[in-house]
Amino acid sequence: MMVGIVNYGMGNLGSIQNMLKKIGVPSLILNDALELDKVTKLILPGVGAFDNGILELRKSKWIETLNHLVLQEKMPILGICLGMQLMTNKSEEGNEAGLGWINAETVKFRFEDNQLKIPHMGWNIVTPTTESSLFNLAYEELRFYHVHSYYVKLKDPTDEIAVTNYGTPFTCAFRKENIWGVQFHPEKSHKFGMEMFRNFSNI
């Protein structure tokens, strides 16, 4: 079992790998497709803007490879923050088309009273909405660290597996077959993130 962390220049690669190391899960930062024969699962991290993320994936020649692995080979993949958003059809943040693995759009937080700050930043409660092995954690209340101004709006609500409330409830985690996405940062979420990564590695 080896988890591959996709390197396209826009993610907390070191933080994710350190977290996986702490829980005894072997991982490999993937700089190109030549190392893919060594891994059984993928993590698509991401920090930054939507269009930049897609353009960097394209520039790094990852899109065709990922489409094959995820859609054809059905390799399990976990998108984190921007990585989750890139899996949708498009984003209000830019003009580029997303990967389109999930029938959803990425939209911006809008609050009429302006009492809540954007980005949504800090620890917040994550509430599972359906049974999922990803959130089979030994805690009554799940708390994860968030940093984002945009969130995923699903077309099919059955893809949702967890919500967070920030002004309004929003989808903070989804699953469609072998594709998982989380809006928060498990690599910054201490014991909660460790258990979630362990669960993903055991899927």
Image (cartoon, grey):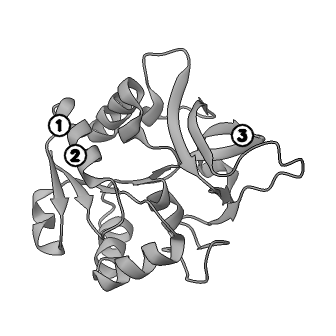
Query: Does residue 22 appear left or right of residue 153 in this picture?
Result: left
Residue drawn where x is 60% and y is 51% of the image = 159
Image quarter where the C terminus lies is top left
Q: Which amino acid, by three-letter code, is at mark 2?
A: Gln
Q: Earlier in the sequence, mark 1 or mark 3?
A: 1
Residue drawn where x is 30% and y is 59% of the image = 75
Residue annotated with mark 2: 17
- As helix, strand or loop, the secondary structure at mark 2 comes to helix
Q: CA distance from mark 2 to mark 1?
A: 6 Å
- Splitting the image into 4 quarters, where does residue 30 fall? bottom left
Query: Does residue 128 appear left or right of residue 54 in this picture?
Result: right
Residue annotated with mark 1: 21
Q: Is residue 198 above or below residue 152?
A: above
- Percent coordinates x, y for residue 154 in the rendering: 67, 58
Q: Which amino acid, by three-letter code, is at mark 3?
A: Tyr
Q: CA distance from mark 1 to mark 3?
A: 32 Å
Q: Which amino acid, by three-letter code, is at mark 1?
A: Lys
Residue annotated with mark 3: 166
- Percent coordinates x, y for residue 105 in the rendering: 65, 66
Residue drawn where x is 17% and y is 37% of the image = 21
- As helix, strand or loop, the secondary structure at mark 1 comes to helix
Query: Does residue 144 appear left or right of residue 187 in this picture?
Result: right
Query: Does residue 149 appear left or right of residue 18 in this picture?
Result: right
- As helix, strand or loop, the secondary structure at mark 3 comes to strand
